[in-house]
Amino acid sequence: MCAMNAVRSPMAEALAKHFFGKSIYVQSAGARKGEIDGFAREVLEEIGIDLSRHKPKSVEELEEWEGLNFDLIVSLSPEAHHRALELTRTLAAEVEYWPTMDPTLVQGSREQKLDAYRDLRDGLTRRIKERLRS
């Protein structure tokens, strides 16, 4: 879960599905709903992951469509972490906060911005593999 389900959480979802396939159930959502970010799509395409079909959704939409039957919620932004903790009032799920930088805040050239998204991708890859390997 991230703020808008536009950068961090869709990248994390796509990476987890890429590395673990159907051995785990993964869905992403945002505290709010945004639009998928083009740089996020681009840096995942660099490693062979297609994010073009991702449709951003809020936590409320996810709950409406599928229910919230998760064992673990990983929050990637302060806003998402607050929302995840609120969910534990009615959902018996573990919540972990993985503070991640928001690459949309990076200023500079196109390449500098892409590097920030690559850093996010690579950091999420490491964390996901470490946490979900078992």
Image (cartoon, rainbow, N blue to C red):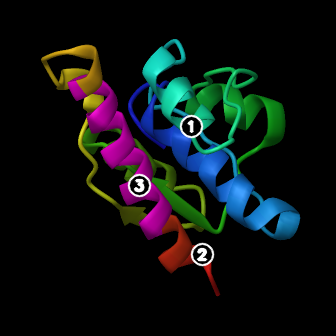
Q: Which of the 4 image quadrants contains residue 25?
A: bottom right
Residue 5 in view here: no
N-terminal label among 1 and 3: 1
N-terminal label among 2 and 3: 3
Q: Which mark is residue 122?
A: 3
72 versus 58 height, above or below:
below
Q: Secondary structure at mark 2?
A: helix
Q: Amino acid at mark 1?
A: Glu
Q: CA distance from mark 2 to mark 1?
A: 23 Å
- Callout 1 crowding tier (Cα within 10 Å): few <14, some 14–19, many ≥20: few
Q: Pick whichever, 14 or 31, lies toward us.
A: 14
Query: How many dots with numbers?
Result: 3
Q: Nearer the viewer, mark 1 or mark 3?
A: 1
Q: Secondary structure at mark 3?
A: helix
Residue bearing mark 1? 46
The reply to whether dot 2 and dot 1 touch (C-beta < 8 Å) is no
Q: Which of the 4 image quadrants contains residue 39?
A: top left
- Callout 3 crowding tier (Cα within 10 Å): few <14, some 14–19, many ≥20: some
